[in-house]
Image (cartoon, grey):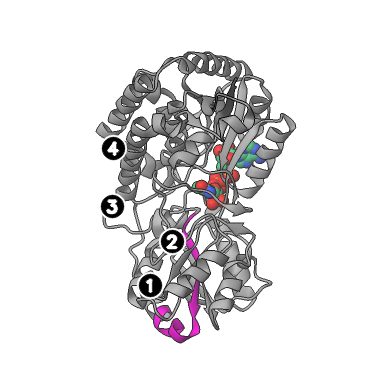
Amino acid sequence: MAIATVNPTTGATEMIVEPHTAEEVRERIEEAAKAAKVLRGTSFAQRAQWMLAAAGLLEEQAEGLGELVTVEMGKPIAQSIAEVHKCVKAMRFYAARAEEFLADAPVGNPSSVGASRAWTRYEPLGTVLAVMPWNYPLWQVIRFAAPALMAGNSGLLKHASNVPQAALFLDTLFERAGFPIGSFRTLLIGGSGVAAVLADERVKAVTLTGSEPAGRSVASIAADNVKKSVLELGGSDPFIVMPSANVAEAAATAVRARISNNGQSCIAGKRFIVHTEIYEAFTAEFVKLMSELAIGDPLDPATQVGPLATLSGRDELAELVEDARALGAQVLTGGTIPEGPGFFYTPTVLAGLSDEMRIIQEEAFGPVASLYRARDREDALRIANQTRFGLSSSVWTADAQEEEWFLANLDAGAVFINGMTVSYQELPFGGIKRSGFGRELAADGIREFCNLKTVWKA
Ligand code: NAP
């Protein structure tokens, strides 16, 4: 696959980038390894100063960067600009809090282990590789880079091949803000180039955000080299609506949850599981709102749903819907590829699903919602937990006992009650089952790529 910007709104190739040669990759790894040694000796205060400068660089270019993101992957312009501001917030958050998150802490009862003092400290691992997806081309990278650099690591980025402009912007961002040369470097390589980078002894660990096959491959290369890995993979999150919920609010939020980022978000509500008592009311409202969405040019501020990021992504989504339709699913709205250029797909609601349909187990990465009627809460939970994914979940109920029951029984890395799942820098983020392992964001995220050193003193 070429490393290129193909504008998903027009289908036109706007930029093709030469991949790095093996020699250039080795040079970049060497730069990053040298920078890691320098960073290890710098103070939190110094790194925070550089991180704040990098945040300032992003903030002052928010509009232009937003446009770059929209042209490369097609999300509506307001969401692209919001992504830039979200990055800025996370950078300022880690600049302010990293030292506290990684502070030395007393451990155990010293006298019971024969010590005068025992404590833990967090130290950087060195150079960490990040393999990242295109769906939030800035945010996915910054939520790794901000904590990794604040911890004193250096970073190497293998970005998705369809977002080279974002990758090239990020290549120089941290250096321009004052970080030592090589603290953060982009590698312009395809997926097949990752194995050699990860096998290099100067690279200490890897984090991958992307699909399950990519995660499986990269984690097994990391395991072969006995290196730490964090995987943030796909999701098919349940959005459960119970009779005590505010149905109108739940339906309006369900639409936002499903179509945000043109439906290409790992934590989007994808399966809408509605109690039979309110199923008709919810469905009528949900389908109405989904069918009224404005599809079009994502640079137009009035557009609510832009194109899918790639032609193959759009075609895979259409195949998933056709598979369900052929096996008897009802298409309540959408289910079509609009006429004209670009990788568009109409917002779609499917009902009447059965176990043999692919959409039951596979992630619908685009504006396609599945509706399920649940007999009771046990049935809702059964449907919610029946996928192999376990990223996040959303439960709508006003019943405290029911809320606690879902909290205790949902197989997921997060539960959002009476709201849609959103990532916040203050909250740990990650999944279970085939959605991956490890956590990003908050204190947990910065500690993933540190050595937790135990100190015992006589
Ligand atoms: P993808 O194909 O897995 O690509 C993600 C990254 O992995 C890209 O940089 C890609 O490079 C690379 N890659 C692919 N196959 C690889 C391999 N065998 N070895 C090494 N690297 C490989 O995923 P996508 O389709 O672009 O992204 C969408 C997926 O990401 C969805 O499943 C979504 O749910 C998931 N996602 C998860 C989260 C989360 O936090 N859990 C967040 C966002 C997205 P190339 O582009 O060069 O192929």
In the rendered image, which quarter contains the C terminus?
Answer: top right
Picture quadrant of residue 200: top right
* Amino acid on which the number 4 mark rests in the picture: Ala
Q: Give coordinates of residue 61: x percent, y percent.
A: 28, 33
In front of the other: 141 or 407: 407
Residue 114 image label: none
First in residue order: circle 1 vs circle 2: 1
Disc 2 element: strand
Asked if the residues shown at circle 1 and circle 4 are in contact, with their CB atoms under 8 angstroms apart, the answer is: no
* Amino acid on which the number 2 mark rests in the picture: Phe
Residue 62 image label: 4
Asked if the residues shown at circle 4 and circle 3 are in contact, with their CB atoms under 8 angstroms apart, the answer is: no
* Residue at image mark 3: 300
Count of labels in the image: 4
Between the residue at mark 1 and the residue at mark 4, the CA separation in whole angstroms equals 32 Å
* Amino acid on which the number 1 mark rests in the picture: Ala
What residue do we see at 35% from left, 37% from top? 93
- Relative side of 142 to 121, left or right: left
* Residue at image mark 1: 251
In the rendered image, which quarter contains the N terminus?
Answer: top right
The question of residue 40 being in magenta is answered with no
